[in-house]
Image (spheres, rainbow, N blue to C red):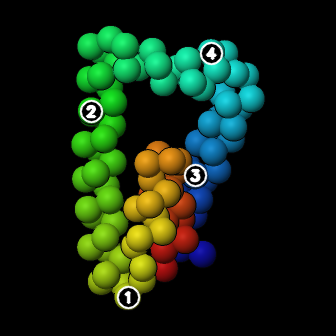
Amino acid sequence: MNRRPALFVKIFCAFFAYTAWVAWQRDPPLLEYLAALRSGTWGAQILVDLAISLGLVCTWLIRDARQRGRRAWPWVLATPFFGSLAPLLYLALRR
């Protein structure tokens, strides 16, 4: 296995495990967390920043997938639901 994909596999696994642990803790519950992000100006800033960042990542992902003759839409559609886990998995599985 190439070193670069192996690194992305490790990053994905570590971040997935952390995300699963956070979700398991449910403190605060996910819906309360999302409501808190939308209620204040800092929360809105964080959401906008994440949306811009993930939008840029998806733009790169689409170009990369086209160059490699792969479909980008599953990864782009998964990104709003799973955040950076979707692009990380794309990078981990990329040849």
Say which label, 1 or 4, has the lower sequence index.
4
> Which of label 2 and label 3 is nearer to you?
2
Q: Secondary structure at mark 3?
A: helix
Amino acid type, residue under disc 1 in the picture:
Gly
Residue bearing the label numbered 3: 12
x, y percentage for residue 81?
A: 51, 47
Between 64 and 49, the residue placed more toward the observer is 49
Q: Among all residues in the image, which is located at the extreme bottom?
A: 69
| Tag 3 and tag 4, C-beta contact below 8 Å | no
Say which label, 2 or 1, has the lower sequence index.
2
Q: Secondary structure at mark 2?
A: helix
Give the residue drawn at x 63%, y 45%. Answer: 16
Residue bearing the label numbered 4: 28
| Tag 2 and tag 4, C-beta contact below 8 Å | no
Q: Which mark is residue 69?
A: 1
Give the residue drawn at x 25%, y 42%. Answer: 52
Residue bearing the label numbered 2: 48
> Which of label 1 and label 4 is nearer to you?
4
Seen in the picture, residue 14 relative to 1 is either above or below; the reply is above
Give the residue drawn at x 59%, y 26%. Answer: 30
Mark 1 crowdedness (10 Å alpha carbons): few <14, some 14-19, many ≥20: few
* Image quarter of the N terminus: bottom right
